[in-house]
Amino acid sequence: MRKILFLLLSMIVVMAAAMAQVGRAKDEGWSELMPPDKDKELVVSSCGGCHDLKIVVEARKSRAQWDTAMNDMIQRGAQIFPEEIEPMSVYLTKAFGADVPKLVNVNAAKRDELEKLPNFKPEMVTRILDARGKSEPFKNAEELRKAVGMEKEEFEKIRYLLKYRN
């Protein structure tokens, strides 16, 4: 009887651990595309606990739309404390507001798409296209930065306008 009880209890623990893993979304590098800020980690842990951060990074919403989205998530069970709503909304609006350009896939973008992005000078676009033609698709920001020979300070101006996969 004890063996059966122990076996059942063990199965429950294993199933609970498996369910916790299933419920937790994978980051898959999307958090790297989120600009640094004191409230970034709050957004990563709160939003990334339920769904892929790709949804956040690719969204472009006004402050009112971000507030509505957060309220919707809270209604669905997101663990967000009242004092966290304001800083999260401010971060999301600043980083992914309606006026922020949509991300461009650096591995597939055409010259004119890159040239339309803020802080992209024609010579920078040429360096990116030349580097792209000589290597495998870029996997992340640091790989791109090194391939085009950009200083970190210069690269920070464009880093959060690019993505590396669909």
Image (spheres, rainbow, N blue to C red):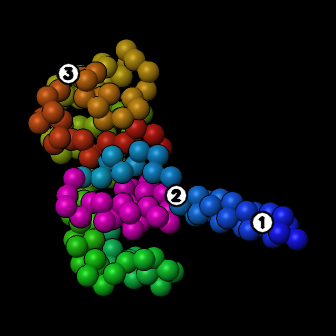
**Is 56 contained in the magenta span?**
yes
Q: Along the line of sight, which residue is nearer the eye, 1 or 51?
A: 1
Q: Along the line of sight, which residue is nearer the eye, 95 or 75?
A: 75
Residue at point 38% right, 63% down?
Answer: 45
Whether residue 148 is situated above or below residue 13 in the rendered picture = above
- Whole-number angstrom distance, CA of label 1 to CA of label 3: 60 Å
Give the residues in magenta.
36-60
Task: Sort mark 1 into few (<14), some (14-19) or many (20+) by Cα contacts within 10 Å.
Answer: few
Is 143 on the left or on the right of 139, as rendered?
left
Report which residue position mark 1 lands on: 6
- Whole-number angstrom distance, CA of label 1 to CA of label 2: 31 Å
Which amino acid type is marked by label 2?
A: Ala
x and y, in percent, of residue 157 in the image: 16, 42
Which numbered mark, 1 or 3, is in the foreground of this view? 1
Report which residue position mark 2 lands on: 25
- Whole-number angstrom distance, CA of label 2 to CA of label 3: 34 Å
Whether residue 135 is situated above or below residue 86 in the rendered picture = above
Whether residue 69 is situated above or below residue 44 in the rendered picture = below
Q: Residue furthest top?
A: 134
Is the C-beta separation of discs 1 and 3 under 8 Å? no
Is 31 on the left or on the right of 8, as rendered?
left
Sequence-wise first label, 2 or 3: 2
Sequence-wise first label, 1 or 2: 1
Image quarter where the N terminus lies is bottom right
Is the C-beta separation of discs 2 and 3 under 8 Å? no
Residue at point 39% right, 68% down?
Answer: 46
Report which residue position mark 3 lands on: 149
